[in-house]
Image (cartoon, rainbow, N blue to C red):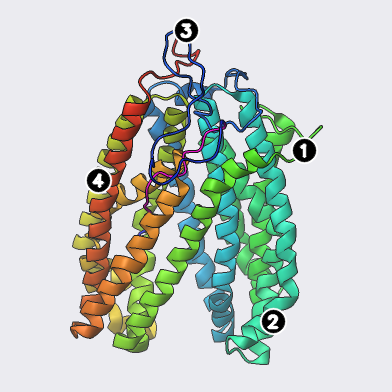
Amino acid sequence: MTTQNNHSQPEDFPSSAGPAESPSTPTQPTTAANTSDTGSPDIVDAGGAPTGSDSSGGIGKMTKGVENLLGNPKKAVVKVSIPVMIALFFESIYNLVDTFWVAGIGAEALAAVGLAFPFFMALMAIATGIGVGAGSAVSRAIGSKNKKQADKFATHAIIFALIMSFISWLAVPLMEPIFMLMGADASLAATTAGYMNPFIYCSFSIFLLNVGNSLLNSEGNSKKTMFATIVGAVLNMILDPIFIYDWGLGLGVNGAAYASVLSFSVSTAMILYWLLIQKKTYVTIRFKGFRFEWPVIRDIIVVGIPATISQLTMSISTVLLNAIVLNVGGTDGAAIYSTGWRIISIGIMPMLGLATGMTTMAGISYGSRDIKKLKSVYYFGIQIGLVLELIIAAIVFVFADPIAAIFATGESVYLQADIAEFLRIMSLLFLFLPANILTSSMLQGLKMGFSSLILTLIRAFVFEVPIAYFLGIHLGMGLIGIWIGALVGDFLVMIISFAFGNYVIRDLKKLYSKPIISESQS
């Protein structure tokens, strides 16, 4: 039940000198035929530079963020991760507040938000995938001292995001019929479509925000993304009641959507100002003379598509677990699971922040062929993650009852003991997160998106869901069996993830004998 855990062989280590290696030689990147003066082979595309690119682009202008990335790797991980953690915390608070305001206008509004949620998540998954792919590519280009290529990746990502957002508009006339096919009556279908369509129409803002955040994070500029995220989250919390209730604009559940897209747009405007107008960032967006280059797009989507599918897989596995829970515990079981998981999700936020730093530093290390740095960052991230999550696990376990009491109120107060039990059992999950999430994010930084995806598929469909079903239904252990089954699945994937992460590092260490020394380190 983690957010990102994936796995396979590192077959997607293509070089600009040719296509990806076949699965029979999974971790070996293609090398150029020529050798350097030292006699060691020149690795073409250590940073993912496509065919015909100018790999001698140089490090280019230096920013404080890039200097940090090319300096002490442990400090770099912390400096990138902490602002992301803070931003994610504000997003979590906003989500809770948003749910509170929508709940105040009735059951149909809550049902509309629930029906629309999978489609909103699909939109976010595509946007996130493009962002992760672009950020990974830019960090590799920075590591290989190729400013020109970093700019190409950034520009392609921005334009690609715009195109995908406009394509999403095709879904607008389909929304209401789809919701009716899902079982909604005419009134609920219309309400749900009215809530969802503003997100689709303003999807360019969602796409550009995700891509822009990833580009800034990839160059060590996560303080800017933190600031933009906090501004958007706080604005959303302020606008929600004004747009929803009759004492304000009185737009009902549609008002919640309008408040969200307006807040997204403000955050997006801030990101675009920094990237396109202020131009104090490392990457430079170059629209003049732009033409699509397939190798550049390929290097973005080789990580981006698996990241998108991983996000969708998480939603599918959640739906399946919900179905198992409903089969065993009915409506009360679903309420226990959804409420408890919402609380657990808040404790996962520090790991998602560390994951951003891990992806960035893995890309930097791979781009510079510095596998010693990669190993140092990987182990440091897991150690820090374990400390943080151990503290969170202890807090959740000890204070399970009062935490459950906050969410089990009114007519749901009788569920408090069951929610507290869920929290005590699932507090162990926090200890499995560092290896699971950080291995996945490292693989994304190494351009091993499909390896990361396979780990997600194994976690969800080989271990977590089947074991939860086996214990909860087949063995008749009930809800406790489902919670334990989910834990066992994540524990098994933790072992696989950590073993595979070490295998990849060892294999790369054999291939890359000498790192590329950046100018800031020379």
User: On screen, 281 above or below 392?
Assistant: above
Q: Earlier in the sequence, mark 1 or mark 2?
A: 2
Distance of mark 3 from mark 4, alpha carbons?
36 Å
Any mark on residue 36, and which? none
State the image quarter where residue 503 is shown. top left
Residue placed farthest to the right in the image? 289
Image point 67% across, 89% down: which residue? 187
Q: Earlier in the sequence, mark 4 or mark 2?
A: 2
State the image quarter where residue 274 is shown. top right
Q: Are marks 4 and 1 in contact (CB under 8 Å)?
A: no
How many residues crowd around disc 2 within 10 Å: few (fewer than 14), some, or many (20 or more)? many
Which residues fall within the magenta stretch? 5-16
Image point 32% across, 82% down: which residue? 413
Residue position marked by numbered label 2 in the rendering: 176
Q: Are marks 3 and 4 in contact (CB under 8 Å)?
A: no
Residue position marked by numbered label 4 in the rendering: 499
Check disc 3 and report its element: helix, strand or loop.
loop
Residue position marked by numbered label 1 in the rendering: 291
Residue type for callout 1: Arg
| Residue closer to the observer: 277 or 18 | 18
